[in-house]
């Protein structure tokens, strides 16, 4: 959980108990993500475009860089790469070598959300006007879908169907079959769908909205 300019770590088994507070950001913290393999590492970004890498056990910031102001997401499984969205650009960083490997450009408005496919080979990025899917092998956009006025805000790859992307817009979910370039719209919330998550273990998708509701979808 983040509060302005700091990150607070909680005990999931006892949610009333805060384990530690991590400070150092000079602006509001916008996003964080835990490393998929290193249990003592997480990263965060603030709206001043600063990315911080943290060591949980040492209670310290181990690296500071620029390039993320909206969202940060580690590559699944191995966590070698980090995707960071800032304005209308998505940057890919190699965490081990501390260098930028890709600058994914093509959105005309601010990128709100990014998500990896389960194997960490593809990345989807969402702005109000469109969603783009990128190949990390080539750094090229391989699929694109216009929002057609739905004001996209979030996305997640479906846990059971590799070619299906779930997109959160204003009140509705778009189920986009990228292989056939076909969409199905599902009424979901009363406001913008601000976040999506999926579980490989149970094959379900969760949606959260500014209407203060969280829903679980099969």
Image: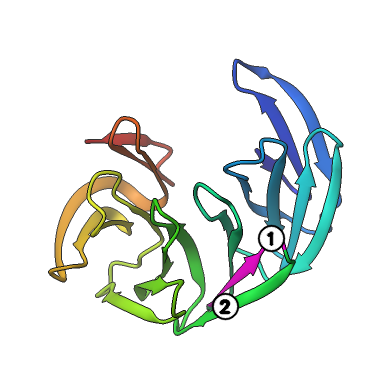
Q: What residue did someone put label 2 on?
A: 102
Q: Residues within 10 Å of mark 2 (few under 14, many from 20)?
A: some
For image coordinates 12% across by 69% down, the residue present is 180
In depth, the one of 209 and 30 nearer the eye is: 30
Q: Measured along the vertical axis of the image, is residue 99 above or below residue 18?
A: below
Disc 1, SS: loop
In depth, the one of 76 and 151 nearer the eye is: 76
Residue sitting at the far top: 14
In depth, the one of 136 and 173 nearer the eye is: 136
Q: Residues within 10 Å of mark 1 (few under 14, many from 20)?
A: some
Point out the image quarter for the C terminus: top left
Is residue 94 magenta-colored? Answer: yes
Q: Position of residue 17 (x, y in %)?
A: 71, 18
Q: Which mark is residue 95?
A: 1
For image coordinates 35% across by 67% down, the residue present is 151
N-terminal of the two: label 1 or label 2? Answer: 1
Work out whether residue 83 can be spotted.
yes
Q: Mostly what secondary structure, the magenta segment?
A: strand
Disc 2, SS: strand
Q: Measured along the vertical axis of the image, is residue 182 above or below residue 16?
A: below
In magenta, the rendered stretch is 89-96
């Amino acid at each position: 959980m983040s509060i302005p300019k700091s990150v607070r770590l909680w005990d999931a088994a006892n949610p009333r108990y805060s384990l530690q507070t991590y400070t150092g950001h000079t602006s509001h913290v916008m996003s964080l993500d835990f490393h998929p393999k290193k249990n003592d590492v997480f990263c965060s970004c603030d709206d001043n475009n600063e990315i911080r890498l943290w060591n949980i056990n040492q209670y310290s910031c181990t690296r500071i860089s620029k390039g993320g102001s909206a969202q940060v997401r580690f590559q699944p499984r191995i966590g070698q790469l980090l995707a960071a969205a800032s304005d209308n650009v998505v940057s890919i960083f190699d965490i081990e070598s501390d260098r930028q490997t890709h600058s994914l450009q093509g959105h005309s408005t601010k990128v709100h959300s990014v998500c990896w496919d389960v194997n960490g080979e593809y990345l989807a990025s969402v702005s109000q006007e469109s969603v783009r899917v990128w190949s990390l092998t080539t750094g090229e956009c391989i699929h694109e879908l216009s929002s057609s006025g739905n004001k996209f805000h979030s996305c997640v790859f479906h846990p059971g169907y590799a070619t299906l992307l779930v997109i959160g817009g204003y009140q509705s979910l778009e189920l986009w079959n990228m292989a056939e370039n076909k969409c199905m719209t599902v009424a979901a919330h009363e406001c913008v769908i601000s976040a999506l998550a999926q579980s490989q273990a149970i094959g379900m998708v969760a949606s959260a909205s500014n209407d203060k509701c969280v829903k679980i979808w099969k």
